[in-house]
Image (cartoon, helix red, strand yellow):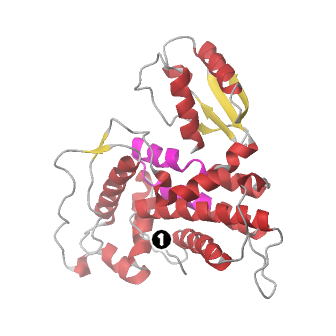
């Protein structure tokens, strides 16, 4: 969303630079302002980084949807968009639906599409993790614009083994396949050994994500035909709403980055951040108030918050599907 808009402006500003300059280099700014985005791109271009960052700052400052653009740190650039621009994340994400995670950040690279691991045939947690990470990385890369390698659009699943020999299958039978797949998906490369430890007492990381998706979908169902009128995204200005909007704006970059660095676990962890931000926003800034019956305090504000709920639902659904898990509409 907004990082993509910023990349488009960089392409226009650097018209004489190679078309292959890296996209998706934006990162959250040190200020932690949800509307601020920082990049170190100038260090990767030929020329003097401070001068390049200063020139780019001047060009970004002229854009009506940019509140400020400042060079710093000898070549870094921080761009802060207006509140109105940040608020557009909600309608744009909602309109894109599960396609909101797609981008062309990894255009020109290749991805290998492999099947999801068969949890009943994996002989070890390492095997299951390796297969989950490979399958997920390929899908993340494809979502970010990579093309599939010729002749490698899938492999046959591994042969099934005696379930009694599979600790993964035993765990899936006890916790459910989705819970185990999510554990595999969110486990970092250096933490695979933890998968074999007892799960009793460990938090269920998938449940809050599924709950947030179901809740955001439920808000839309409950709204029904209340006649809330046209939603105005600009009304989403409360701190909790801005925090959630800021997180949602990164979905394309987070997906591409996870594929680029080979750490697919970053996507489930991002979904957990979104779920936590949604929970805070829903409690403090609800779209609907229930006093015997649904009655929005202000139809315009309620409409904007319903749109934010729809955007949240879309991001969580896209992310869950990229982990190999079907999002739940109801819990």
Residue toward you, 162 or 14:
14
Note whether 150 is above or below 185 in the view shown: above
What residue span does the magenta drawing correspond to? Answer: 248-274
x and y percent of residue 255 in the render? 47, 49
Mark 1 lies on residue:
327
Note whether 257 is above or below 98 in the view shown: above
x and y percent of residue 231 in the render? 71, 60
Q: Quadrant of the N terminus?
A: top right
* Disc 1 crowd, CA 10 A, few/some/many (<14, 14-19, 20+): some
Q: Magenta region, mostly helix, strand or loop?
A: helix
- Assess whether residue 251 is covered by the magenta stretch: yes
- Assess whether residue 62 is covered by the magenta stretch: no
Left or right, residue 40 beside residue 300: left
Q: Secondary structure at mark 1?
A: loop
Which residue is found at the position 56% from the left and 70% from the top? 213
x and y percent of residue 264 in the render? 42, 52
Which residue is found at the position 29% from the left and 65% from the top? 117
Left or right, residue 207 beside residue 136: right
Q: How many marks?
A: 1
Residue 70, image quadrant: top right
Q: Quadrant of the C terminus?
A: bottom right
Residue toward you, 156 or 125:
156
Which residue is found at the position 64% from the left and 55% from the top? 90
């Amino acid at each position: 969303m907004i990082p993509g808009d910023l990349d488009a402006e960089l392409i226009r500003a650097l018209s004489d630079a190679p078309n292959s300059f890296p996209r998706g280099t934006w990162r959250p700014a040190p200020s932690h302002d949800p509307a601020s985005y920082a990049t170190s791109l100038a260090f990767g271009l030929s020329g003097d980084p401070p001068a390049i960052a200063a020139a780019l700052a001047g060009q970004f400052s002229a854009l009506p949807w940019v509140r400020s653009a400042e060079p710093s740190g000898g070549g870094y650039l921080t761009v802060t968009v207006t509140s109105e621009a940040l608020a557009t994340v909600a309608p744009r994400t909602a309109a894109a639906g599960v396609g909101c995670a797609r981008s062309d950040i990894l255009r020109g690279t290749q991805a290998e599409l492999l099947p999801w691991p068969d949890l009943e045939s994996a002989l070890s947690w390492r095997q299951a993790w390796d297969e989950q990470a490979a399958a997920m990385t390929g899908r993340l890369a494809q979502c970010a614009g990579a093309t599939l390698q010729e002749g490698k659009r899938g492999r046959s699943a591994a042969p099934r083994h005696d379930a009694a020999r599979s600790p993964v299958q035993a765990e899936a039978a006890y916790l459910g396949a989705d819970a185990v797949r999510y554990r595999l998906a969110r486990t970092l490369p250096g933490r695979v050994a933890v998968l074999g430890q007892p799960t009793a007492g460990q938090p269920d990381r998938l449940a809050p994500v599924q709950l947030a998706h179901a809740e955001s979908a439920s808000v839309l169902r409950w709204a029904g035909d209340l006649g809330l009128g046209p939603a105005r995204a600009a009304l989403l200005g409360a701190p909790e709403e801005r925090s959630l909007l800021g997180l949602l704006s990164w979905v394309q970059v987070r997906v591409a980055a996870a594929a680029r660095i080979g750490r697919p676990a970053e996507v489930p962890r991002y979904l957990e951040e979104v779920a936590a931000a949604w929970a805070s926003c829903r409690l403090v800034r609800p779209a609907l108030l229930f006093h015997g019956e649904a009655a929005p305090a202000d139809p315009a504000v309620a409409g904007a918050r319903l749109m934010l709920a729809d955007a949240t639902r879309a991001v969580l659904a896209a992310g869950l599907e990229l982990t190999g898990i079907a999002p739940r509409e109801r819990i």
